[in-house]
């Protein structure tokens, strides 16, 4: 939530977000919003005394009919692996947790709480906000920790419920703040003394309890399904294993069965469908789908908040019909020039482009748009631009339910999946559409009967229109677009750079390297550190975060130097970055399992790095062109080979056929007789630089290597070498700002972190892969 926090007067907060409800004739309400029920509450000596006395005081006052206040400080929600529990909560009375008969506290229920209430005994020491500081954030350690705790509570409400916005109350000794979150930003009231100005707190609670569910932040297009209802039982029946199991397709049913977690809420979700929008033939309807626990859920609060579900289509009567589909629920960026993902897929499907999802339906959820971005400029008049974006709630349903790419069976299948997606990317670009978010989480495996597993290029929500077939054209954004770990070094070093074909092809290379280093055999002994330095790392300069040194050097030199894994201070790293890269002291090498023979993926990665090194040299107009040595050990027998279909071989032959185009590059890989140091002494290789400016050379390289089926070992995939708990950073003293950023990139992510600046206040977590 960096640059997304605003403190405002209580009166403004109430006027903006909770205007007084109109009088209702014929109804009765207990309690008075202006009554100060806290004036005689004794000053607490610790937090325990606060949540011991406050629930009874609030419930007895009768301010919030239909709601109950419950203390839940110690017993975590059984569904929550983070083991967090907020001190108090305001619940709809039918869903309020019941304290045990032994007098202990009730158990937290994140799926039911309407307003979390956090208690701190100090008015300042753990106040998450500083009214006078930039971005309303304090630099004090405890106060920053309290801010992180506040964000985690809001995120948990979003995680277990279907919410458009969330309120949290902070009690800080005798003082209080009220905070509102949506997926664009947060607003907090200025701190007030609720012992003296109790009407500010009771007035908020009185108004809140009289709002509709939608006004309180709940999504009316999502209806909770009781686990034991007829529909809930039907969902469980569909998830039962069949008598005859198709091993290639049963993963979908098995994943749906896993999603029917009884600790989680299940939902019936609506998708508004508009056909022939804006024409006289326009028609509107609503499709409904039953879902369980999300198959994927992006971390954080601000942003798209993407969730993915394996879903079952429902009839108008609420009965299950049809096969499993995949439903994506997201708060898309609503900005001119960014089309809805479903519209892009509809066009790609109409063009017959392969290896992209098949659209079932899509639509915006009416009336569900963030408002923080509209209010923020009023309280930051000095800012030249608003960092908050307008987000529109949106749902998309596609036919295919793919497998994550990390479930590839062997290296050949991994490379083939990437080739399929590059073909899809090429066809889309020829049609005037560029993807702009090539990442590990956006490439799936999809089984095609009779043809086997293929790649599926998913997640087109950041796609933009470009000049068809023009490699130099791309979409410009006011900030970086993509997933940090897989973006090109050029894009990471220039936040305003339009994403073009070389950036996307480089991202495919980074995806290949990401999975190869994790699962294949190589000479790197510190995979966790490698993943951090190559994919997560950054350099700090010129007011923005730039590409990490290991990725940058790889693209500049054409080699990945494992010597960079040796620990260095920030000063030493900064000194190296200013220097001209030299030959790799210990280049990364992939080999076949149990052998010294080079793996075909080594040839692919080595060749691509050489091409990109030439391209980067050309771009920077430097005299030297760094490259890698393409020599390797003689081939050795490494076990059984892979059986492939005739369709596979025909596809490789079609791509890897000789070209008669005189302008086409003549060679795919480096001359083995030429050493890396000789390459560096040579002028810029314009031929190599051209190879990454269109798709064709990379496609031919992959197809050429895939045709050599006998060179690909069938058993080359090993266990995942990525540390289970992420890379453990050294305990050496580093500047405070660096510490925050290192913690923010603890585990290599693979999914949908779109705005790619590392944000110290929003930890990155592993997402899709």
Image (spheres, rainbow, N blue to C red):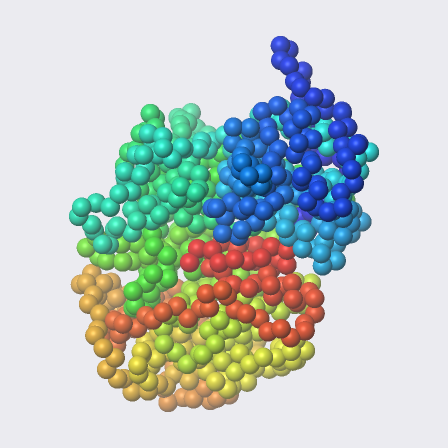
Give me the residue at 61% from left, 44% from top: 73
What is the x, y in percent for residue 455? 33, 58
Front residue of this view, candidates 754 and 236: 236
Quadrant in which the C terminus is drawn: bottom left
Q: Is residue 302 visible?
A: no
Horizontal relation, residue 616 to residue 673: left or right:
right
Horizontal relation, residue 280 to residue 85: left or right:
left
Front residue of this view, candidates 237 and 43: 43
Horizontal relation, residue 639 to residue 131: left or right:
left
Give me the residue at 71% from left, 42% from top: 49
Q: How many marks?
A: 0
What is the x, y in percent for residue 80? 50, 48
Horizontal relation, residue 468 to residue 729: left or right:
left
What is the x, y in percent for residue 597? 31, 83
Where 525 sits versus 11, above or below? below
Q: Is residue 37 visible?
A: yes
Where 265 sits versus 653, above or below? above
Where 455 sits versus 279, above or below? below
What is the x, y in percent for residue 232? 35, 34
Query: Seen from this angle, which residue lies furthest front?
Result: 102
Where 312 sits versus 416, above or below? above
Front residue of this view, candidates 688 and 703: 703
The part of the image, by quadrant, that contains residue 347 is top left
């Amino acid at each position: 939530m960096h640059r997304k926090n605003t403190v405002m007067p209580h009166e403004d907060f109430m006027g903006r977000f909770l205007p007084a409800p109109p009088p209702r004739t014929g109804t009765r309400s207990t309690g008075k919003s202006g009554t100060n029920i806290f004036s005689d509450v004794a000053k607490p000596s610790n937090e325990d005394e606060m949540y011991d006395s406050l629930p009874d005081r609030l419930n007895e006052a009768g301010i919030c009919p239909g709601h109950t206040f419950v203390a839940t400080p110690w017993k975590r929600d059984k569904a929550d692996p983070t083991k967090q529990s907020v001190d108090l909560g305001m619940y709809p009375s039918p869903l309020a947790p019941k304290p045990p008969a032994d007098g202990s506290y009730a158990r937290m229920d994140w799926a039911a709480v309407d307003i979390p209430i956090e208690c701190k005994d100090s008015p300042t020491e753990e106040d998450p906000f500083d009214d006078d500081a930039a971005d309303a954030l304090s630099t004090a350690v405890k106060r920053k920790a309290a801010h992180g705790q506040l964000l985690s509570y809001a995120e948990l409400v979003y995680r277990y419920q279907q919410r458009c916005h969330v309120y949290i109350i902070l009690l800080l000794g005798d003082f209080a703040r009220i905070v509102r979150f949506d997926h664009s930003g947060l607003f907090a009231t200025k701190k007030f003394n609720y012992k003296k100005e109790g009407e500010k707190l009771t007035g908020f609670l009185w108004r809140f309890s009289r709002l509709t569910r939608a006004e309180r932040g709940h999504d009316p297009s999502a209806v909770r399904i009781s686990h034991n209802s007829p529909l809930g039982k039907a969902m469980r029946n569909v998830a039962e294993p069949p008598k005859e199991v198709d091993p290639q397709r049963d993963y979908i049913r098995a994943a749906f069965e896993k999603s029917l977690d009884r600790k989680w809420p299940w939902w019936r979700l609506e998708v508004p469908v508009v056909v022939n929008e804006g024409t006289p033939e326009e028609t509107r309807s609503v499709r409904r789908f039953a879902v369980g626990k999300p198959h994927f859920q992006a971390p954080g609060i601000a942003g798209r908040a993407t969730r993915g579900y394996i879903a079952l289509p429902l009839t108008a009567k609420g009965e299950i019909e049809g096969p499993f589909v995949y439903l994506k629920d997201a708060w898309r960026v609503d900005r001119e020039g960014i089309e809805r993902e479903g519209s892009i897929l509809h066009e790609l499907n109409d063009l017959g482009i392969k290896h992209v999802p098949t659209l079932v339906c899509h639509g915006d959820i009416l009336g569900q748009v963030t408002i923080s971005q509209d209010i923020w400029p009023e309280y930051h008049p000095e800012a030249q631009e608003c960092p908050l974006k307008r987000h529109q709630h949106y749902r998309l349903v596609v036919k295919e339910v793919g497998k994550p790419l990390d479930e590839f069976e062997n290296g050949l299948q991994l490379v083939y999946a990437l080739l399929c997606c590059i073909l899809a990317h090429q066809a889309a670009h020829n049609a005037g559409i560029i993807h702009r978010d090539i990442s590990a989480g956006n490439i799936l495996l999809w089984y095609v009967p009779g043809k086997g597993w293929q790649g599926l290029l998913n997640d087109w929500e950041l796609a933009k229109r470009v000049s068809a077939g023009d490699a130099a054209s791309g979409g410009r954004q006011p900030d970086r677009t993509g997933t940090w770990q897989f973006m090109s070094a050029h894009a990471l070093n220039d936040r305003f750079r339009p994403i073009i074909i070389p950036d996307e092809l480089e991202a495919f290379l980074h995806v290949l390297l990401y999975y190869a280093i994790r699962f294949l055999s190589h000479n790197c002994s510190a995979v966790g550190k490698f993943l951090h330095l190559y994919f997560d790392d950054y350099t700090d300069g010129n007011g923005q975060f730039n590409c990490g040194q290991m990725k940058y050097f790889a693209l500049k030199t054409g080699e990945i130097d494992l010597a960079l894994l040796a620990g260095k201070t920030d000063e030493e790293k900064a000194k190296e970055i200013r220097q001209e890269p030299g030959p790799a002291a210990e280049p990364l090498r992939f080999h076949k399992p149990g052998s010294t023979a080079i793996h075909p993926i080594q040839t692919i990665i080595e060749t691509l790095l050489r091409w990109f090194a030439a391209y980067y040299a050309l771009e920077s107009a430097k005299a030297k062109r760094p490259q890698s040595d393409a020599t390797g050990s003689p081939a050795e027998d490494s076990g059984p080979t892979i059986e492939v279909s005739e369709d596979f071989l025909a596809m490789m032959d079609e791509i890897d056929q000789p070209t008669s185009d005189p302008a086409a590059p003549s060679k795919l890989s480096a001359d083995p007789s030429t050493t890396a140091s000789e390459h560096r002494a040579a002028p810029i290789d314009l031929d190599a630089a051209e190879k990454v400016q269109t798709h064709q050379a990379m496609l031919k390289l992959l197809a050429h290597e895939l045709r050599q089926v006998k060179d690909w070992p069938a058993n080359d995939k090993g266990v995942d070498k990525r540390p289970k708990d992420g890379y453990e950073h050294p305990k050496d003293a580093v500047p405070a700002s660096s510490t925050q950023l290192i913690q923010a990139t603890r585990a290599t992510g693979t999914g949908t972190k779109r705005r790619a600046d590392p944000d110290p206040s929003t930890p990155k977590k592993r997402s899709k892969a």
